[in-house]
Image: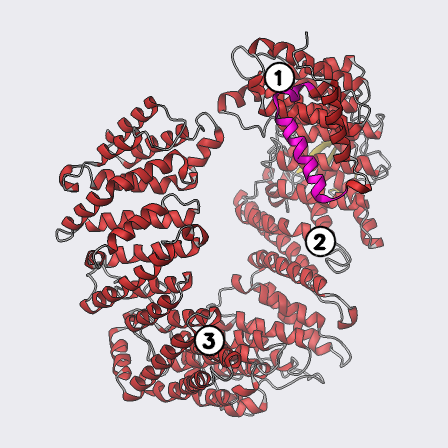
């Protein structure tokens, strides 16, 4: 009798018809909606218990699609409906499925059907193998034996074994079950090794070799080293460039061994690293030579590149240790490396090894060959993304190699592998040469070789990042892809700098000078731009506080003075990036009088320009004809500044120019302060600068103004800020007649004003470095009381108030105002001449919130409330907020509550506006931390409504909203319990809302809240247990433990998987807990039980992440 249900023939035919329509749609049934309905109908059929009876009829149908659906149904039913199979039928069911798979193998079913059946068998094993005793011992061997008996091909056996290895490790099992499944895989390893070994012989058909190699890749992480190592020589012997498909498959397998096997940690020097290096020396070299000569990368060459990269990642330390080694290694010549292949020299002598013999070869020779090959791919001719894609793959190696060079210790030349092969110069030790001297010499040799390698790398990469001529016709996508590649190369160049240091910067500077000297008028600027890009890329690795002879040449007349200032946007854009990146270097130059450049005046190219353009030289008061009158530092700085300013009016360069100007002025405030009048000239020429960059320009000028004594900064600030305020007033006046134009002007001017405020901010290099000295702070406060500054700040505030009144509901205006408020407010220790107090701005924010509640306005309110009670960076207790700050919050809090609760009180509003909910409770949390008592001064009912809203938020599905609400509740209760005057209020609060809060928390554990917020709910539970543990703390309204029991045992508690015993255990664990850790453990366990996740890896992971 069959263990599967028998279906009516009509039901089977109906299912077959649906499958046929879904998988072989006719022109009349290709409507997507119709196909979707068919798929849904098939899904519903699979869900029925009777669907077990479809498996055999569908597998026996001649249509391949029907067969596949039958195999798929088998897998789905085993995974989802296994519990419906009676226990006494399990063995019969297992045997039936094995026979079904074997019959399909014998019937030569298609590969896709067999693979699905193999997956179903593996799913069946996951159900039957775990347990004691197991219900399916030696299941892999049993399946292979039966398949072989039914005439399965070797490739089909390989496919089955590969699927087993792919499916089992990814199964969601508990530790004990996973261990049993892993053991079943380990038990099958000898059989799998034999199946693979017998199929990767040179005489075996190519398709069988490839299937064996796919199987090997699937078992790669399962094989122990002892079983994996013997396969490596066989794989290397398959690396024959004349058999492309087999070569690529073998290369892929070796790459997997290098990156994912038991040898992936860099082990296997003798068995893996050196044999592969030997193969590269004998065979790989010729492959790469063909690539270099032809310029084309064949599939074999591409696979070779991947293999080289994988070997480099695996054997980085070996390569670093032996880059200058004099040790010889002994390698058994694989059969594939026939005697006609050229041998490699050792000690200058060519030794021709025979097949099966050992070849002695210097390790350094193998390493040098490897480095030459990977360098060849790194510098492959052509442009990345257009002509080739391989060079990018090699970039990561150079980072690893540089790290390995730093971390390796050069060994003493003695044999470290125990193979009896020693250094080629061991005689040195026998004649008494001092060993320390030898070690020092060899370490220097290692450094020398490493530098030679990275010098060549630097030269190669400089060429690779060179753009083609403008006439190349590249599209935007090609340019963007190449730019990404250039950034990746920049990261690699940083690693090269750590090896070469000043030599690298010197190479690029000398390269620039040579190219400028040799440049003809018709030559392009691509090579020069490439060198500048490389210099820009390594800036973060250079210590700009150290003296260097190269940067003065770069920013002096020798290079900067000869770069174009008209046309040529790409090279100018890159040079602007260089200036911006190195802006802080100018501040570290000694301010002594000296000629601008110690180098001889170079021959000018036809496109060369002076170091300082004539117009800006006058405005900056730089007497360029007599450089000796200006300090070297000033001359270099002003030359760079002049170059930047000349690019500001150019729309194609203004962005980079604005950034460079901002960086220069920010880093060199004091040096530029004496030239403030020249910046006045720059300010007067703002009309020629694109609107998008005016903010950066004025921020730059403001940075210089900040370096002036406060009383001297007043006039320039008036000149800078007054026009902004005037233009904002003009926009306000025209808001009715020209609303769109007025709005655009207002946004622009607000952004510019934000830039000015940022520029006036004091430079800060650390947590406390930005604080002003008391004497300096006093000077600023005196200057702030100057009538001109008082009037200027009043005008700023008045115009901002008017903007809020008219445009507070506009998103663009709101963003601009938000940025302005953040920029123009400050802590008391970092105040500027135009800083506005937080209190009045908070009133404006409340005004805007009353008109339209947005997350951005609430965020701004949170920031301003925090500034009303600023922290003190001192070893003293933080004092409470000042009375005037308390008054501001007392006025603002009801407004914030009224606006927030009116929006969130609407049904479904909190679900639709998670950003508002998150920021609102974040704001309330800020008030609870700094102004706790203000909640108890709210109008009657205000706090109760807020708590009810917060408790409701604990059932939301949006994580961040729930987290913000729980944080607020915990903070309010904790902070209220810290002072005697607030303790009565805390007791009343807990008495009114503790029971509802406990219910929300417990129902959240049981399934209402997302699993990811369980830790936050545990914090609230801990707060209740610690702050409402006695009746005194709750005004005799019960205790937290009593509320907990009432809630859990209530008939209307949310339905869950937790039994009465589980609830009792939970209560006992919480009530008896004396630490938050035990509370957390008990709550986590209850969460798993209540949600039905106990015993599941997924469940444990979800509550412990």
Give residue 240's mark: none
Residue placed at 68% from the left, 72% from the top?
Answer: 528
Residue matched to label 1: 187
Q: Earlier in the sequence, mark 2 or mark 1?
A: 1
Which residue range is magenta in the image?
30-53
Residue placed at 62% from the left, 65% from the top?
Answer: 534
Magenta stretch: dominant secondary structure: helix
In the rendered view, tell whether residue 790 sits above or below residue 848: below
Q: Which quadrant of the figure contains the C terminus?
A: top left
Residue placed at 29% from the left, 73% from the top?
Answer: 840
In the rendered view, tell whether residue 16 sits above or below residue 8: below
Residue placed at 38% from the left, 47% from the top?
Answer: 962
Question: So how many labels did they put on this image?
Answer: 3
Q: Nearer the viewer, residue 952 or 117?
A: 952
Residue matched to label 2: 391
Tell me residue 524's x, y (percent). Answer: 74, 75
Tell me residue 995's x, y (percent). Answer: 25, 39
Q: Nearer the viewer, residue 24 or 418?
A: 24
Q: Earlier in the sequence, mark 3 or mark 2?
A: 2
Mark 3 packing: few (<14 Cα in 10 Å), some, or many (20+)?
many
Report whether 452 appears left or right of 704.
right
Using the rendered image of the protein, determine whether residue 161 is visible from the camera's viewpoint: no
Q: Nearer the viewer, residue 225 or 189?
A: 189
Q: Secondary structure at mark 2?
A: helix
Label 2 to label 1: alpha-carbon separation: 43 Å
Q: Earlier in the sequence, mark 1 or mark 3?
A: 1
- Residue 66 sits in quarter: top right
Report whether 10 appears left or right of 809.
right
Q: Secondary structure at mark 1?
A: helix
Residue matched to label 3: 751
């Amino acid at each position: 009798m069959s263990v599967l249900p028998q279906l009516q023939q009509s039901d089977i035919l109906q299912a077959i018809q649906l499958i046929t329509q879904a998988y072989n749609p006719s022109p009349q049934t290709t409507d997507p909606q119709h196909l979707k309905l068919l798929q849904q109908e098939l899904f519903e059929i699979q869900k029925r218990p009777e669907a077990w009876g479809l498996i055999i009829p569908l597998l026996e149908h001649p249509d391949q699609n029907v067969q596949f659906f039958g195999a798929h149904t088998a897998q789905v039913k085993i995974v989802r409906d296994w519990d419906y199979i009676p226990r006494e039928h399990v063995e019969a069911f297992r045997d039936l499925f094995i026979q079904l798979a074997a019959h399909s193998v014998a019937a030569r079913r298609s590969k896709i059907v067999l693979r699905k059946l193999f997956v179903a068998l593996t799913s069946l094993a996951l159900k039957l193998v775990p347990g004691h005793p197991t219900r399916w011992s030696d299941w892999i061997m049993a399946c292979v034996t039966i398949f072989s008996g039914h005439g399965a091909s070797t490739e089909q056996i390989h496919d089955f074994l590969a699927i087993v290895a792919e499916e089992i490790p990814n199964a969601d099992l508990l530790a004990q079950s996973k261990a049993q499944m892993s053991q079943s895989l380990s038990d099958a390893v000898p059989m799998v090794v034999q199946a693979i070994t017998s199929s990767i012989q040179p005489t075996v058909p190519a398709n069988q070799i490839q299937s064996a190699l796919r199987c090997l890749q699937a078992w790669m992480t399962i094989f122990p080293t002892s079983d994996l190592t013997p396969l490596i020589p066989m794989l290397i012997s398959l690396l024959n460039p004349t058999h492309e498909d087999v070569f690529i498959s073998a290369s892929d397998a070796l790459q997997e061994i290098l990156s994912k096997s038991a040898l992936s940690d860099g082990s296997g020097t003798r068995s893996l690293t050196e044999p592969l290096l030997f193969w590269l020396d004998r065979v790989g070299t010729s492959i790469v030579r063909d690539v270099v000569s032809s310029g084309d990368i064949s599939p074999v060459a591409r696979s070779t590149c991947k293999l080289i990269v994988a070997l480099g990642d695996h054997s980085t330390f070996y390569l670093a240790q032996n880059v200058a080694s004099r040790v010889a290694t002994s390698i058994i010549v694989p059969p594939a490396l026939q005697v006609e292949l050229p041998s490699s020299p050792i000690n200058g002598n060519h030794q021709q090894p025979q097949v099966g013999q050992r070849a002695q070869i210097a390790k350094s020779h193998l390493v040098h060959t490897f480095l030459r090959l990977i360098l060849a791919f790194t510098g492959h001719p052509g442009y990345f993304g257009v002509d080739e894609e391989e060079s990018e793959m090699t970039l990561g190696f150079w980072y690893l190699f540089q790290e390995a060079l730093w971390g390796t210790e050069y060994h003493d030349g003695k044999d470290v592998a125990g193979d009896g092969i020693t250094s080629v110069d061991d005689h040195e030790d026998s004649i008494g040469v001092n060993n320390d001297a030898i070690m020092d010499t060899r370490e220097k040799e290692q450094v020398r070789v490493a530098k030679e390698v990275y010098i060549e790398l630097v030269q190669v990469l400089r060429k690779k990042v060179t753009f083609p001529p403008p006439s190349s016709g590249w599209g935007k996508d090609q340019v963007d892809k190449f730019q990404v590649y250039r950034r990746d190369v920049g990261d690699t160049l940083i690693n090269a700098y750590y090896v070469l240091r000043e030599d690298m910067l010197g190479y690029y500077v000398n390269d620039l000078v040579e190219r400028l000297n040799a440049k003809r008028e018709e030559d392009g600027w691509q090579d020069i731009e490439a060198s500048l890009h490389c210099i820009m890329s390594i800036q973060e690795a250079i210590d700009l506080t150290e003296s260097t002879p190269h940067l003065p040449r770069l920013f002096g007349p020798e290079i900067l003075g000869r770069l174009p200032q008209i046309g040529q946007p790409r090279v100018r854009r890159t040079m602007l990036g260089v200036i911006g990146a190195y802006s802080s270097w100018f501040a570290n130059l000694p301010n002594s009088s000296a000629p601008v450049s110690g180098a001889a005046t170079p021959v000018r190219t036809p496109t060369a320009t002076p170091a300082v353009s004539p117009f800006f030289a006058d405005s900056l008061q730089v007497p360029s004809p007599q450089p000796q009158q200006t300090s070297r530092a000033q001359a270099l700085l002003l030359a760079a500044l002049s170059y930047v300013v000349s690019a500001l009016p150019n729309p194609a360069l203004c962005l980079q120019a604005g950034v460079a100007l901002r960086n220069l002025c920010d880093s060199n405030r004091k040096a530029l302060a004496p030239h403030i009048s020249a910046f006045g000239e720059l300010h007067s020429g703002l009309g020629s600068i694109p609107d998008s960059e005016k903010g950066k320009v004025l921020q730059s000028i403001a940075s210089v103004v900040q370096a002036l004594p406060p009383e001297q900064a007043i006039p320039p600030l008036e000149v800078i800020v007054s026009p902004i305020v005037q233009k904002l007033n003009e926009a306000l006046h025209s808001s009715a007649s020209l609303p769109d134009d007025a709005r655009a002007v207002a946004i622009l001017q607000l952004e510019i004003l934000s830039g000015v405020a940022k520029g006036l901010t004091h430079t800060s290099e650390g947590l406390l470095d930005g604080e002003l000295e008391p004497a300096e702070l006093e000077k600023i406060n005196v200057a702030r009381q100057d009538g001109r500054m008082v009037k200027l700040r009043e005008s700023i505030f008045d115009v901002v108030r008017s903007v809020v009144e008219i445009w507070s509901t506009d998103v663009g205006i709101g963003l601009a105002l938000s940025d302005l408020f953040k920029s123009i407010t400050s802590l008391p220790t970092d105040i500027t001449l135009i800083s506005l107090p937080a209190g009045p701005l908070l009133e404006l924010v409340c005004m805007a919130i009353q008109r339209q509640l947005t997350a951005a306005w609430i965020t701004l309110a949170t920031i301003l409330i925090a500034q009303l009670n600023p922290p003190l960076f001192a070893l003293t207790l933080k004092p409470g907020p000042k009375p005037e700050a308390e008054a501001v919050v007392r006025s603002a809090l009801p407004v914030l509550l009224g606006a927030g609760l009116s929006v969130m009180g609407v049904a479904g509003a909190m679900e639709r506006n998670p950003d508002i909910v998150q920021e609102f409770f974040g704001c309330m949390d800020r008030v609870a931390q700094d102004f706790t008592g203000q909640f108890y001064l709210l109008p009657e009912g205000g706090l109760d409504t807020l708590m009810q809203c917060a408790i409701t938020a604990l059932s939301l599905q949006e994580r961040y909203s729930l987290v913000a609400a729980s944080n607020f509740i915990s903070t309010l209760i904790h902070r209220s319990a810290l002072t005697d005057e607030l303790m009565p209020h805390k007791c009343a609060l807990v008495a009114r809302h503790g029971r509802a809060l406990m219910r929300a928390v417990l129902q959240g554990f049981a399934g209402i809240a997302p699993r990811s917020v369980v830790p936050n709910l545990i914090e609230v539970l801990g707060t209740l247990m610690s702050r409402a543990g006695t009746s005194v703390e709750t005004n005799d309204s019960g205790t937290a433990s009593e509320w907990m029991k009432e809630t859990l045992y209530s008939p209307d508690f949310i339905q869950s998987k937790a039994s009465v015993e589980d609830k009792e255990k939970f209560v006992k664990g919480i009530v008896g807990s004396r630490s938050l850790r035990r509370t957390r453990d008990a709550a986590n366990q209850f969460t798993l039980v209540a949600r039905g996740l106990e015993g599941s890896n997924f469940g444990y992971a979800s509550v412990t992440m």
